[in-house]
Amino acid sequence: MKLWKGRFTKAASSSSNEFNASITFDKRLYKEDIAGSIAHAGMLAKQGIIGQEEADMIVSALLAIKEDIDAGKVEFSIDSEDIHMNIETLLTERIGDTGKKLHTARSRNDQVAVDFKLHVKNEIEQIDGLLEKLLETLVDLAEKHQDTVMPGYTHLQRAQPVTLAYHLMAYYQMFKRDRSRFADCLERTDLSPLGSGALAGTSYVTDRDYTASELGFAGVTENAMDSVSDRDFALEFLSCVSISMMHLSRFCEELILWSSKEFSFIEIDDAYATGSSIMPQKKNPDMAELIRGKTGRVYGDLVTLLTIMKGLPLAYNKDMQEDKPPVFDASDTLKDSVNIFTEMIATMKVNTDVMADAAKYGYMNATDCADYLVGKGIPFRQCHEIIGNLVLHCIEKGCAIEDLSLEELREFSDKFDADIYDKISVRACIEAKKSAGSTSFASVKTQIENAKK
């Protein structure tokens, strides 16, 4: 039986019932819905709108309903459309007319808004915990690999030597910013819409601050129409999730490359790889590839909600019922991805010797060689040309710059002296970086210490 049936003379068709219902996906909001109703019942009693005994009866029944749902004893009904009306129907069945008083001074519009905000707040808390664990894992790995030399890349071409710790700490900064973005999102989400009614408020003397406090909100929303129309918090949340997935995807792309035979920088643990159904030798980085692929799916969730909201007039419209599936999907995907990614990098094997060889034979000391000549008084652009010719000579000869004799080096510039070899070793190139935030061993050590703090 529809709780809103009074105005209607004809029942909805079975196809309309199924199409209109959201219980198939919003049933996961039952804890938030019951929490909101308990706070609302307490407020109604506090304000003398219903009796204290009635409120106590409502709260007791709601807690019993929650226990039954937790235990899997409740079968939700499509006829009751959504989680809000399903729970209200159960409540009325159990305590009769007293249950019908619960909806006084509220609407499903503010009810769904408060449920959704409570859900997003909880998701942010869970995601923050997972990101914190990821950051800790990155710092632990970086600390172990402060002396692991590897090529740094631009355009996927070897550019300058760095350390693996330095590379890892770059991602640390990205995921650290992700945490701060979620914290910012939480600040704007943390205002309660409960008590706003359908769109214009209520004629009852209510206490919205009381319900906000009971539900753990920092305060209340200021405009009732905005309160029931706002999905900015969900859009911002999806944006934060999308950016975090993008960072995971970039890292996964590198792990996929690094685990290939062509790189052989790392080996992903067997627990996070799969084989081929036809090629016995294969070990595929499927977990990393799945995270990379799921990133596109999460982007789709963000675009979905942006598209739903873009043409809606104020206040509530039924289109907004479709706001929850993309948020549920994106949040679940990010949590699963961060969890599996953290486990994967914690267990991967790093082939330090291969990384070191790649750093040595990639002419990545060319810039430092040019800087050496700058120190001898030659303008940088001229040094750039000299070293470019020198690298071309080494490529044709099949050797590294440091393999050339001093006589060969002086064929390109008479400014070269014996101290050049001390300046262009891979470790010397790394240590020579003096700017804050550089790849030097001391700088990376500071970054790790700051991260630990």
Image: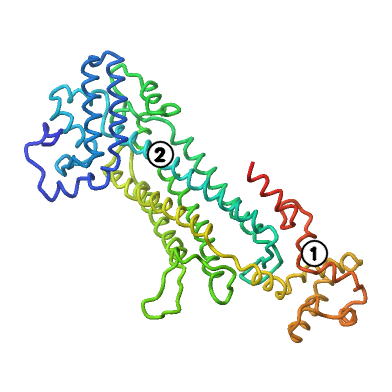
Decide if residue 61 is on the left or right side of residue 376.
Answer: left
- x%, y% of residue 292? 46, 62
- x%, y% of residue 343? 48, 56
State the residue in front, 177 or 107: 177
Asked whether the beta carbons under mark 2 and mark 1 sit within 8 Å of each other, the answer is no
Q: Which numbered marker is on residue 451?
A: none
State the residue in front, 56 or 267: 267
- x%, y% of residue 70? 26, 39
Q: Residue at label 1?
A: 428
39 lies above or below 181: above
Q: Amino acid at mark 2?
A: Asn
Q: Residue at label 2?
A: 122
Return the residue found at the far left.
Answer: 9
Q: Amino acid at mark 1?
A: Ala
Decide if residue 445 is on the left or right side of residue 329.
Answer: right
Decide if residue 81 is on the left or right side of residue 410.
Answer: left
Q: Which residue is painted at 12% across and 34% down in the image?
A: 5
Q: Nearer the viewer, mark 2 or mark 1?
A: 1
Q: CA distance from mark 2 to mark 1?
A: 49 Å
**Which of pointers 2 and 1 lies earlier in the amino acid sequence?**
2
The crowding category of the residue bearing disc 2, from other C-alpha atoms within 10 Å (few below 14, some 14 to 19, many at least 20), is: some
The crowding category of the residue bearing disc 1, from other C-alpha atoms within 10 Å (few below 14, some 14 to 19, many at least 20), is: some
**In which quadrant will I find the N terminus?**
top left
Q: Which residue is painted at 21% across and 36% down in the image?
A: 68
- x%, y% of residue 406? 89, 78
Question: Please, what secondary structure does the residue beneath circle 2 have?
Answer: helix
